Image: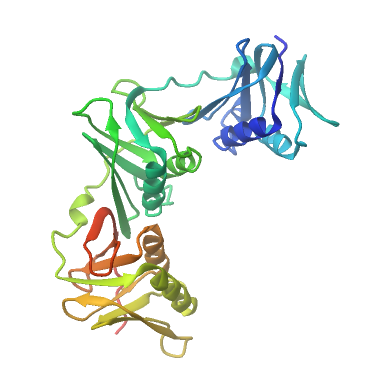
Amino acid sequence: MAVKFRVERDVLAEAVTWTARSLPTRPPVPVLAGLLLEADAQGALVLSGFDYEVSARVEVPADVEEPGRVLVSGRLLAEISRSLPNKPVEVTQSGSKVSVTCGASRFSLLTMPVDEYPALPQMPDVAGTVAGDLFSEAVSQVTTAASRDETLPILTGVRMEIEGETLTLLSTDRYRLAMRELPWRPASPDASAVALVRARTLSEVAKTIGGGDVTLALSSGGGRELIGFEAGGRRTTSLLVDGEYPKVRALFPAESPVHAVVETTPLVEAVRRVALVAERNTPVRLTFDEGQVTLEAGQGDDAQASEALEAVLIGEQIAIAFNPQFLLDGLQALTTPFVRVSFTQPTKPAVLTGQAEADGSDDVGFRYLLMPVRMAG
């Protein structure tokens, strides 16, 4: 069936770009490199992408003259739509080709066999809703600690725990652990569920959902386990990561006899400066003493750096060393003016939490646990 519709250039470009992000770079079958465009007589244009693991679907308004469906190269259409002049775009199918016309620009694309395109998975049952800005912040805080090592697929995921009106996100790469708790509105007041979602997928969703509410959906057993996200006319589904996630909550110490409070931004800047002389895999050393923290990197005949900052120390002096990038990741995930660094001992993990004021209490809604690096000597 021939397809013909007109759509605003910005609307098309944004929808195509968003949907094409989920397309595989090396598709297992050629049609999965395609973007499915479905125009209906009611004036809706639906764009879909699918790679058997993650699906993306967005609906936008269009002036539809001939309803129908057509499959074209997703990456090529994304590049074309972004480069078009700011005028209405007309898309017309003629036989095995699709023409994209915008002002004086005209492109002709080959179609792909639409009948071979797999059906997108249905959205699972709605589990609840969460504020989009809160969810985006939580995802960016937690995914920083997820592993990038695909040989350990479980650790590339973020564990999502639903318990009543609390949604908890957890991730670890064995060297650090991030945990964020946030309020949400469950579909059922006694909701309880666990899902392990790929951090990469979660990040893509969080970057594009905007400030409205996000609907979270989970399959309730049977068949392949799915999670779904929907916000602002955009819908994503993803297969869950299979496997048993390590019991990481127990890593957070029950109490910390020593803690220090430092201004977050100056500490971030100081770590960056001092880390300039830290050779590959060498740590930044932090010595917390009465009234200050001293940062040092480099030793012996190598380049060296040190810097001191004001700090409030509760407890005895302590010296500890961290991977500078892992420390920066944790500090930059905080959204508060001050950071509290809590210790049990120099060879045990430290925990970073945020504080609104230097002499206030810390906010344990977000916690970042960091393994220390053994210091030489």
Tell me the colour scheme of the image: rainbow
Q: In the figure, residue 102 lies in which quadrant? A: top right
Residue 125 in sight? yes
Q: Which of 211 and 24 is in front in this view?
A: 211
Query: Is 95 situated left or right of 377 in this image?
Result: right
Query: Is 51 situated left or right of 220 in this image?
Result: right
Rendered residue at 37%/68% (across/down): 264
| Quadrant of the frame with the C terminus | bottom left
Total number of numbered labels?
0
Residue 97 against residue 20 in the figure, above or below: above
Rendered residue at 62%/15% (across/down): 43
The location of residue 280, given as percent across then percent down, is: 46, 72
Query: Is 178 situated left or right of 6 in this image?
Result: left
The location of residue 139, given as percent across then percent down, is: 39, 46
Q: In the figure, residue 212 lies in which quadrant? A: top left
Q: Which of 140 and 22 is in front in this view?
A: 140
Rendered residue at 70%/38% (across/down): 82
Residue 91 against residue 178 in the figure, above or below: above
The location of residue 128, given as percent across then percent down, is: 31, 29
The location of residue 37, given as percent across then percent down, is: 63, 21
Query: Is 8 situated left or right of 237 in this image?
Result: right
